[in-house]
Image (spheres, rainbow, N blue to C red):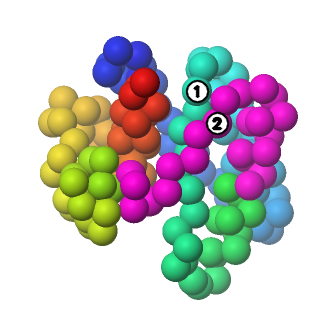
Amino acid sequence: MLNSNLIDFKIISSNAKDSDYERLIDINSQVINFINTHNPSLIVIEGLAFRSVGSKAKTLAGLHYIVACELISLQYEVKIVYPSTLKKYATGRGNANKQEMEHCTPSEILDQFKCKKIDDLVDAYWLAKIGERP
């Protein structure tokens, strides 16, 4: 985001047939390459949901720390925003659902997000908005 204008976005995916380790390495590489393309002054990442359970929760936690540590080692300023803080900023409620988050997102932004993972992009939009705050 630059002056509240969306500059670029990318949906990052990996091969589901690869091992978790291979996928984490691949996703981390894609994230770092994308970020290095834009060289932002601040990177805002959604923190971990403390109540997350399930088979992928540990893998997502690993990805979170791999990416954050890599960014910090590359001298980027990284800010972590926890899910409830993100939701409260976007909607006024810390326990808002995906539909409420989407409803609070400007239509001109949503029009650019024509894809299956719109909820992830909506979260990314609001993380960027938090990053714009002084």
Residue 29, numbered label: none
Residue under label 2: 78
Amino acid at pointer 2: Val
Instruction: Using the image, determine if residue 72 lies above or below residue 25.
Output: above
In the current view of this chain or complex, which residue is farthest to the top? Answer: 3
Label 2–label 1 contact, CB within 8 A: yes
Q: What residue sits 40% from the left and 36% below the top?
A: 130
Q: What residue sits 36% from the left and 41% below the top?
A: 126
Determine the secondary structure under disc 1. loop
Q: What residue sits 59% from the left and 40% below the top?
A: 79
In the current view of this chain or complex, which residue is farthest to the bottom? Answer: 54
Indicate which disc, 2 or 1, sits on the residue closer to the N terminus.
1
Residue under label 1: 42
Relative side of 35 to 131, left or right: right
Image location of residue 75, percent across then percent down: 78, 26
Image quadrant containing the N terminus: top left
Q: Judge whether residue 62 is colored magenta.
A: no
Amino acid at pointer 1: Leu
Relative side of 64 to 119, left or right: right
Image location of residue 85, percent across then percent down: 40, 55
Decide if residue 115 is in sight here: no
Relative side of 41 to 88, left or right: right
Per the rendered image, the range of residues in magenta is: 65-86
Decide if residue 41 is in sight here: yes
Instruction: Using the image, determine if residue 106 lies above or below residue 68.
Output: above
